[in-house]
Amino acid sequence: QSVLTQPPSASGTPGQRVTISCSGSISNIGTNTVNWYQQLPGTAPKLLIYTYNQRPSGVPDRFSGSKSGTSASLAISGLQSEDEAAYYCAAWDVSLSGWVFGGGTKVTVL
Amino acid sequence: EVQVLESGGNLVQPGGSLRLSCAASGFSFSTYAMSWVRQAPGKGLEWVAGITGSGNNAYYADSVKGRFTISRDNSKNTVYLQMNSLRAEDTALYYCAKYGYHVNSALSGDHWGQGTLVTVSS
């Protein structure tokens, strides 16, 4: 059971907008920033979003993040076939003094 | 170019020990925290341990506290994970990742290795 809660799956057709939620608590999302990672099949995770909505260089602006209270969201606009991957949210938890991850959301492009 | 390369994964019996290594290059190693993150077969990501750039502070997930020890040698640009009292549930691909100026920095996990496989089985 993950500390952060994500839906196990999401899907959309090419060009659509897909949103993934991440629910936590005051000790993690409510207090600290949220990161999002993308993991393509058979590869290492890649940092997609940090500090709620900042993108490392090279990450397309189709990816955006937001936070409200103890929840966060990742939005993928203009969905493309290469976006088919697992997406994980993560946040520092002050009570645990460690990072916690969501269980991951598998995005399928129909 | 930042590079992170893990090694040391192997098949080990329950109760046994193993030490993983992570060699990093392409950045000012001692300036940045490093972490180990694992992924059991077919499962999600689990943060295991993190260490500050100086090596003075280490943090652990409850699932490994008291059994695993993270350390680093800044003269060798290498971080280690000593794993003792291994259990079947520790079986996973172990990733090493560059974190931020502190273990809990926002810009964390911006570079990852390809992982090293640890299998705990008799």
Image (cartoon, rainbow, N blue to C red):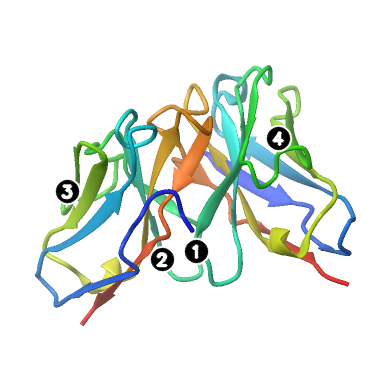
Asked if badges 1 and 4 are on one and the same chain, I answer no
| Residue depicted at x 24% and y 45% | A72
How far apart are labels 3 and 2 at the CA level?
A: 18 Å
User: Please, is residue B99 above or below residue A74 in the view?
Assistant: above
**Residue picked out by circle 2:** A40
Asked if badges 1 and 3 are on one and the same chain, I answer yes
How far apart are labels 4 and 3 at the CA level?
A: 33 Å
Q: Quadrant of residue A6?
A: bottom left
| Residue depicted at x 44% and y 49% | A3
On the image, the x and y values in percent for residue B98 come to 53, 36
Please say if the residues under marks 4 and 2 sit with CB atoms less than 8 Å apart.
no
On the image, the x and y values in percent for residue B110 come to 44, 40
Instruction: Identify the disc placed on residue B47.
Output: none
**Residue picked out by circle 1:** A43
Question: Dot 3, crowdedness within 10 Å: few (<14), some or many (≥20)?
Answer: few
Q: Mark 3 or mark 2, which has the lower sequence index?
A: 2
Instruction: Identify the disc placed on residue A61.
Output: 3
Q: Say which element carries label 4.
A: strand
Asked if badges 4 and 3 are on one and the same chain, I answer no
User: Please, is residue A16 above or below residue A53 in the view?
Assistant: below
Please say if the residues under marks 2 and 1 sit with CB atoms less than 8 Å apart.
yes
Asked if badges 2 and 1 are on one and the same chain, I answer yes
Q: Nearest the camera: A14 or A2?
A: A2
- Chain that bears disc 4: B
> Please, what is the three-letter code of the amino acid marked with disc 4?
Val
Asked if badges 3 and 2 are on one and the same chain, I answer yes
How far apart are labels 4 and 2 at the CA level?
A: 26 Å
> Please, what is the three-letter code of the amino acid marked with disc 2?
Leu
